[in-house]
Image (spheres, rainbow, N blue to C red):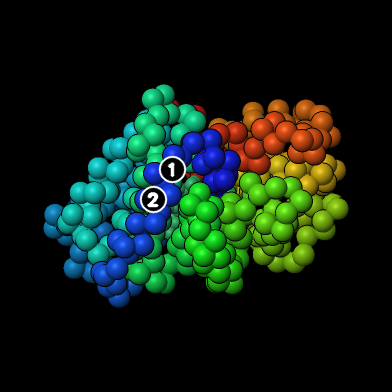
Amino acid sequence: MKTRGHALRRAMIPLSLALAVLTTGAAYGGLASPRRGADAEAVAAIPVGTTPDGSSQSCGPAAAARAAAIETFWRVFHDNDYTHIEDAQAALQRGLAANPDDGTLHALLAATHWWHVGESARDPSPDPQVLSRDLPTALQLVEEAVKLDPDDDHLPGFAGTLMVHLGRFAQDAILVANGDRTLAYSVYQFPEFNNFNRWAAHNADPKGSDGFRLALDSLWQAVDACAGETVDRHDPDLTRYMHLRTAVGRKKVCWDENPLAPHGFEGLMASLGNGLVKAGDVDAARIVYRNARLAAHYQDWPYRADLESILGSDLRARAALYDDADPSNDPPVTVRGRSCAYCHATGPER
Ligand code: HEC
């Protein structure tokens, strides 16, 4: 999920990353505990101090550390509080020290590292050393989370995207291929959600490439899965589908009532609009950007001005920037310099 591509490129990850990638594999082994249930979204919705299954974890210091970690992560993430990522990381580390086999805590710690490097453009004093470790650490933690929570079908999508990004940096074709295979399976499992991950894995690929075609097609497939039918590619006005919006069940990932990603709908429309501009399909892009305004809380979306300014600009000129010989002037296909916050944040940047 994110620009992942663009923001990561901007992070200027040094050669040491490639080495880190190659050594990450060694850290994967062990610890495959068959713990089930308790996925992040369920946990997040549950008051601090309890667990979803009411298990013995529901009291005592370990449970308290776990609950505090989850609460801190979502507070910092929703508050758009990039400068306090380290607080979330510290809380998650404390939670993990007391609950070493907890898949959710591994997944959320991974998310902090991904967010950190993915939005490094907003870091007032970026540390290349730290940034170069973020992605390999995120992948390692997600791999661990997949083992610990095999039933959480968001996680393979995260793992696949991270593998593609890391594989690209390391010029490791096998890792990229493994990532693509993981993504294909994750899409089979959970199309509404993981098609966005597949977009994120390939959205920075060159305009005419198979990778970019797959990325854009994946976003369309996400929208189709949400609409319950194939959406008209020439007139993708979603007004007629808005009655489907829901805050429960698997389809909640599609809509603006998702408690974990309150502006996921706007983020999806901004991404698809940008992808269509890159593909040169400006008329469809304009309709898709306008779809974002259908979100119930569009007025409160912290990134509304970004989308409105693109919509008010010369989209044909924007599309043409992808066609000239200079890749450095290509507009980003995400909200500029952001990877996560435009779907997850409820407030302005801090
Ligand atoms: C296009 C919108 C979008 C973007 C961009 C996005 N997310 Fe999400 N994310 C979602 C949605 C929607 C869900 C909710 C899934 C659900 O309710 O099951 C979600 C769920 C999550 C979860 C919980 C997963 C679970 O297992 O329950 C985490 C963690 C997360 N996102 C982290 C991130 C990070 C880190 C980034 C940036 C690198 C990011 N997201 C970018 C839309 C987005």
Residue named by callout 2: 19
Residue count near mark 2 (Cα–Cα under 10 Å), binned few <14, some 14–19, many ≥20: few
User: Residue 33 location, x and y as percent?
Assistant: 27, 73
Residue named by callout 1: 15
User: Residue 120 location, x and y as percent?
Assistant: 46, 34
Front residue of this view, candidates 250 and 199: 199
Most distant residue in the bottom direction: 34
Most distant residue in the top direction: 124
| Tally of numbered tags | 2
Residue contact at pointers 2 and 1, CB within 8 angstroms: yes
Q: Which mark is residue 303?
A: none
Horizontal side, residue 334 vs residue 132: left or right = right
Q: What residue type is labelled 2?
A: Leu
Horizontal side, residue 313 vs residue 45: left or right = right
User: Residue 101 location, x and y as percent?
Assistant: 25, 65
User: Residue 242 location, x and y as percent?
Assistant: 70, 54
The CA distance from mark 2 to mark 1 is 7 Å
In what quadrant of the picture does the C terminus appear? top left
Q: Tell me which corner region of the image, top left, top right, bottom left or bottom right, holds residue 222.
A: bottom right
- Check the image and report above or below for 315 versus 90: above
Mark yes or no: residue 177 visible: yes
Mark yes or no: residue 157 visible: no
Q: Residue at x 58, y 41 (%)?
A: 6
Q: Residue at x 66, y 49 (%)?
A: 205
Q: Which amino acid does label 1 sit on?
A: Leu
Query: Quick one: SS at disc 1?
Result: helix
Q: Residue at x 67, y 57 (%)?
A: 211
Query: Quick one: SS at disc 2?
Result: helix
Q: Which residue is drawn at 76% across and 38% down?
A: 322
